[in-house]
Amino acid sequence: MLIQFSVENFKSIKDRMTLSFEASADKIHENNYFIAKAPKAEKILKVINVYGANASGKSNIFMALTAAILTIRLSSSIQPGMMLGNIIPFKFDLETISKPTSFEFVFIAEDSKKYVYSFSVTKERVFAESLFAYYSAKPTMIFKRENDSYVFSAGYAKKLKPLSERTTDNKLFLAVATTWNCKETAVPFNWFMKKINTYSNRYDEVLHITGEKFEKDKDETLKQFTIDMLHAADINISDYKFSSKEVKALGLQNNMPPNQPFSGFPILNVIKEYEIRTKHIVDDGSGKKEVELDFSEESFGTRSLFFLSPILKNAFENGEVVCIDEFDASLHPLLVAYIASLFNNPNINKSNAQLVASVHTTELMDLNKFRRDQIYFTNKSRKTAATELYSLDEFSVRKSDNIRSSYLLGRYDAIPNIISQEI
């Protein structure tokens, strides 16, 4: 589970900003957080919604998450001299262009221990990296790195020092040590591999991820979950057929979206081509009959919800952190609110999965459903072009206040300053 994510000097993010899942002392909506004990009891939010005007930096938060996660995941496969991808500094300041980009994650891994992992990189090399673990109330340093200089805690030095000599300046030690079967780094590294993912809101573009789940759905639990989701959205699909075949991936690499920020798009020689047929039961006056459609004939919103379903099901079963930019694209506001409410529902979200999503719909701005600390805003300075991030909890807001109306009136900023003019 994610407790905090911090980033500095990435795209429009100049100064360090932190997205925090730590719940405030407010006692409302107790289902919207869970209690984690690592090592002391902490209240952790299940959902965070990020609002802001277009070009205010919302997407850059999710790109930063993606860049950090992919840098960790792919680090051990990087060859000496290779560039690190997706690292883009703040370019509106001559000083920050040449400075490293910094990331920090505070999280609880599968061993129920709290970890703090941070690293600073440019496209060329790693400048700093550290890992701390909370085995008790105080953090224990596992390793700390400044350029090519390493410091290890006494109990880890003998084992970890030889591995540092195998780590080139463009690789993360966390990944290299795990490759060499270091158990002290394996647990936090595996959290980045399995427990947090960013997804494109073009859910059909992540079919290479979800397609395998549909294929392996032998007990049809995913099918039932998907159909239930479609029915909850008032979409009249009674069943579907899912099939696949392998095809050569000729030209796939050249057709990749440039600088694709979200996880996925593996480069393969062979890929799978999927065919989906949906079934509808209709009554044309002469009685009920079943009509079959090719999936391409369904609306974009229907296709989005279809491909989103295995992502949600996997998250609820495995306690995954799901990060989606423009989450409400092609989805009705009431449906977006419904999906977010599933994460806050302890009877459905039994593994304490978390959702962080950027949205435009104000349907989620309801203090009868969400807490003040679950609503964040991004705002970009017209003077410096730098993004700032802050939560509704920083404002003096009463539960009875109409925050939706206040937001649209600009009381929290984070809305476009539209200038009326003749076009």
Image (tube, rainbow, N blue to C red):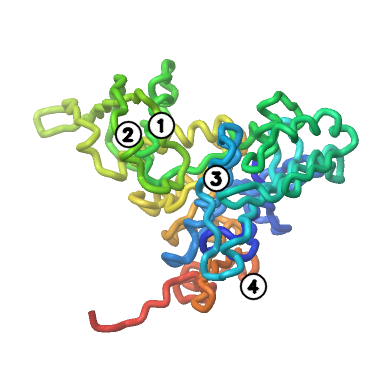
Q: Earlier in the sequence, mark 3 or mark 4?
A: 3
Q: Nearer the viewer, mark 3 or mark 4?
A: 3
Eye-nearest disc, 4 or 1: 1
The answer to which of 238 and 59 lies nearer the viewer is 59
* Dot 3: element: loop
Residue under label 3: 84
Residue 60 spot, x, y in % from top left = 50, 57
Query: Which disc, if any, is residue 125?
Result: none
Which circle marks residue 396 in the picture? 4
The residue tagged 1 is: 267
The local crowd at label 1, few if under 14, some if 14 to 19, many if 20 or more residues have their Cα within 10 Å, is few
Q: Residues within 10 Å of mark 2 (few under 14, many from 20)?
A: some
Looking at the image, the residue that sits furthest to the bottom is 421
Residue type, label 1: Ile
Q: Earlier in the sequence, mark 2 or mark 3?
A: 3
Do labels 2 and 1 touch, CB within 8 Å? yes
Q: Residue at x 48, y 76 (%)?
A: 410
* Disc sitting over residue 252 in the figure: 2
Where is residue 355 drawn, in percent x and y?
A: 54, 46
**Which of these two is toward me, 173 or 288?**
173
- Tell me if label 1 and label 3 are in contact, CB under 8 Å: no
Q: Amino acid at mark 3?
A: Leu
Residue 184, by quadrant, is top right
Q: Position of residue 3 (x, y in %)?
A: 68, 48
Marks 4/1: CA distance? 50 Å
- Mark 2 or 1, nearer chain start: 2
Is residue 73 at all visible to an observer of this figure?
no
Across and down, in percent, residue 29 comes to 62, 52
